[in-house]
Amino acid sequence: MRFQRAIAAWVFVWLAVAGGLAFASDSLAADSRDRDIGQFYHTAWTVREGAPGQVTALAQTRDGYLWLGTQTGLYRFDGVRFERYRPRQGGDFQASSVASLYAPPSGGLWVGFRYGVASFVDGDRATHYAASSGLPTGTLYAIGGTPDGNIWAATFNGLVRLDHGRWMSVGPSMGLPGVRARNLFVDREGRLWVATEDALAWLPRDGRRFEVATREVGRVNRIAEAADGSIWVAEADGGVRPAWAGGADPSEAGPVLKLSSAGLLFDRDGALWMPTLGDGIRRVPRVRDLPHRVIGAESAEAQRFLERDGLSSDYASSVIQDREGNVWVGGSRGLDRFRVSRLLPAMLPSGATDFAMVAAKNHGVWVGTKSRPLSRVDANGIEPIGLTEAITAASRDADGIWLGGPGGLWRLHEGKPEPFAPLPYPDYSGVQAVVGDGKGGAWASVNRPGIFHFTEGGWEHDPLPAVPVDSAPLVLMNDHHGRLWMGFARNNILVRAQGGDVVIGSGEGLAVGNVTALLEDGEAVWVGGELGIGVVVAGRARMIAMADDPLRGVSGLVRDHRGDFWANAAQGVVRIAAADMARALEDPDYRLPGTLFDSLDGLPGTPAQFRPLPTAVVADDGRLWFATTSGIVSIDPANVPRNALAPPVSIRSVSTDIGTWPAGPRIDLPAHTERLRIAFTATSLSVPERVRFRYRMEGLDTRWRDAGNEREAIYTDPPPGQYVFRVTAANEDGVVNEEGASIEVGVARAFYQMPWFFLLCLLAVVLLAWLAFFLRLRSMASQLRARLQERHAERERIARELHDTLLQSIQGLTMRFQAIANRVPPEEPLRGEMERALDRADEALVEARDRVRDLRAHAGESAHIDAALRALSSAYAAEHTVPVVVTTYGDLRDLGELVRDELYGIAREAVHNAVTHAEGSRVDVELRVEDTELVLSIRDDGRGIDEAVLRDGRDGHWGLRGIRERAAAIGALVSIASRLDGGTEVCVRLPVALAFPHRAGWLRRALDRLR
């Protein structure tokens, strides 16, 4: 516990130092106390904008969220969206009416409710405390933390402190008088201040007993510390006043504000903000300047901002300043924000319009209008003078300040307007432009074509025949060469010099439309008009392109003391760096970047396009002034407020078409996610409209996506996988939070996207392919068997026809010849010839019978090839004298049918050739299994075969070719070897897998069937 308190103390000190440095830095940059409360940029959120009502407490947590405690619950605000907070872990709140909020520097939020309930919120989890934790049953008016890590609470039943998860009462034992603690506060030195019904007391840092500061207190609603260290209180009955100033008289520290208040704030610059219970907001910029003063409800010494000025409600009860310097006020109808705008509004009289400006001497500007007196305006106020005439044009040169209006021309002398000349036409109602001629006279543009020149002799009118348009100049300017520049409508400029007039128009490259602003810059003249900015150099003109949208309606062009250019355009006030403008002069293709200041920066309207012109002026002190149709603003270009804090980024939620999930470190989405939405935000509360986001889904996006100011990323049909979504943000000044926020996103796979499903599909495809292949093989096998049966049937038919017709006829013929021969005497030579012819016929008949037998007999008639071969041997042994010896080795029972038939045919052909032609004494037929091959060998010891016959065959005989064709049909290799002195050998080799398909795998058997 000591270690935790030490860490908390270190964090407290570090943040205090950091806050002090930020305070000092901001103080050097600008002191907001110089502004009136009406010159702050004010925004109100009411119920119509989604804000809750009855705001009772405000706090900002370390993540940048603004928290609103209301009578109906707890809300948080990111600058754009209000969200009611309900914890998702730890259980819901035990009460709804919030009385106090406290955001510790270390993070999280303490919430004090009415009737004795407190909760600590950390992210999505809440820890609740009630009577069971020692907390009194009364309302928690305030919660605070001291540097030693202790948490204190002021309740209706006294002061309590959190100790190891239990609240302990603190009272007389520590010297604190009273029984009720109405409020508490921790000052910059770490002292704990407590207000009771009897006294205001403080506990020194690391102290053990309270010291009484004063007993003159009422019902204290709030305690605050001023810049000088004095302690102020807001009392329900006595108003706001200093209550303690060390050893000095508290009344010396500032005034007493006699208004009922429940809130109190000293901002970074030391100004006092006081929300009242029915009288709006009061602000005292410098309390030390008003000692002993009593300020009432109508006193002008305290600036007022009321409901009629735009405040959401005159009843306000809470006020804080956020880390960016914005002041927030919570009231009965909503929430209000006051921030320092970059453009400072001028304090003009109500109803003023059509502002003619000219720089005043030393500082500020002279402003003339159609409806209000001429006034000198500076950053701090306005000073009217006696001239009540309408002023429509103004300029300044070496002769002084010129003013023009329906009543004539005036010249200011020592701050007083002196009539110079009446208008040349008394019925005219105004002056468009006026400049001095450097000789005591003046040039004026009135509602008549041409230009008017006033000299000692009176008015002279020049109709300007060289100008192609029949109109009066819109703007006038004297350059350092003494030339008069006149800008007209429709792209025309006339330059009058001693040598004559020079016209610059569209033919010379001018394309600005109506010429409404002129600015001399050395030998270049910059031209502003309705279509943008152009430049004229040596009599030639060209347009200047912008990097973003082209400028429109440029009616004011000035250059500040640092050399940068400023344009008052329809989009707003645009700053262009001097280096960029110089580059644009050298490179016609260069597109100028610019910084825009618009309504979010305090610009109240758009600049005039006709009269009064110009709408931009540089004051002697360097301050720039810009006029619009609704008011005048100014800016110090050397001290433009800048937000240097990177915006904290957070991911709010992840949603799809079927539901929404709260953001966490990881989110797992179901399969079939069609539309993924990731909502994110950045808590930059000054100008949230200008916060820019970019995001990237790692694993899906190949680059960062620019979201602009959109706070949601949408992905359509994200594929299954594991991703990391990252988002970063930049504030209105481009300060980027590079770390941003991230969340892991997992999109589940559908069952048909799982790897096992792909394997099953692949297996199913393979099985279907195999089934189709198998069915195809069966079909082909059936066709082959049918063809084989047809072939055997045809062979049997041929054999039957040969046997029943040809052989029978030949047999009958031989028998008839034999009968004839028997009639021839044996001694007759003819008998011998006939006997020899009959013998030859018998031989042919035997050979024919053998062929017919071959046609009819095949291996399919025997179940086994070894039995078929032996039957073949027996048949030849019965008819021939040459023995045929058959030898088999191995198991030949499951020999394939086609293989069996073809091997039998090869053996039969080879045996027949050996018996018929070899003239040998023995034929050996051997069938054996050798490792992976089935070998059929037929050898004889006859006279062999000539090489030519072995290669080409014998004319009219097809035995050798038939052997080779049968071997090829079953995928076997055949070799026929013969020696003239050693006989002939026919050897057939066939792989076992082809010979015995039932022994091979199913795929091999199928391939074998296909082959």
Image (spheres, grey):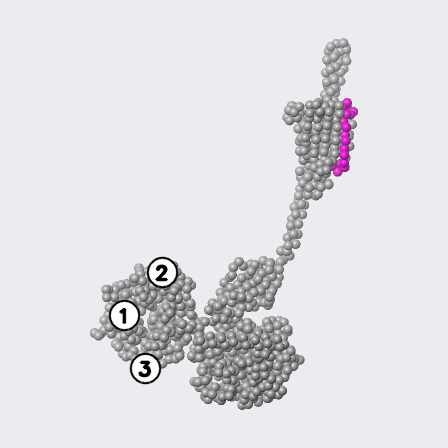
The circle on residue 747 is none
Determine which residue is flagged by label 2. Answer: 586
Circle 1 sits in a helix, a strand or a loop, which is it? Answer: loop
Q: Is residue 368 visible?
A: no
Pinpoint residue 145: horizontal percent, then vertical percent: 58, 79
Looking at the rendered structure, which numbered label has been put on residue 448? 1
- Find disc 3 in the rendering and name its residue: 386
| Magenta range | 876-895
Residue 786 is drawn in which quadrant? top right
Amino acid type for the residue under numbered disc 2 = Glu
The alpha-carbon separation of the residues under discs 3 and 2 comes to: 49 Å
Tell me the amino acid under the disc marked 1.
Arg
Q: Quick one: label 3, few (<14), some, or many (20+) residues within 10 Å? A: few
Between disc 1 and disc 3, whose residue precedes? Answer: 3
Q: Nearer the viewer, mark 2 or mark 1?
A: 2
Q: x and y percent of residue 917 in the render?
A: 71, 23
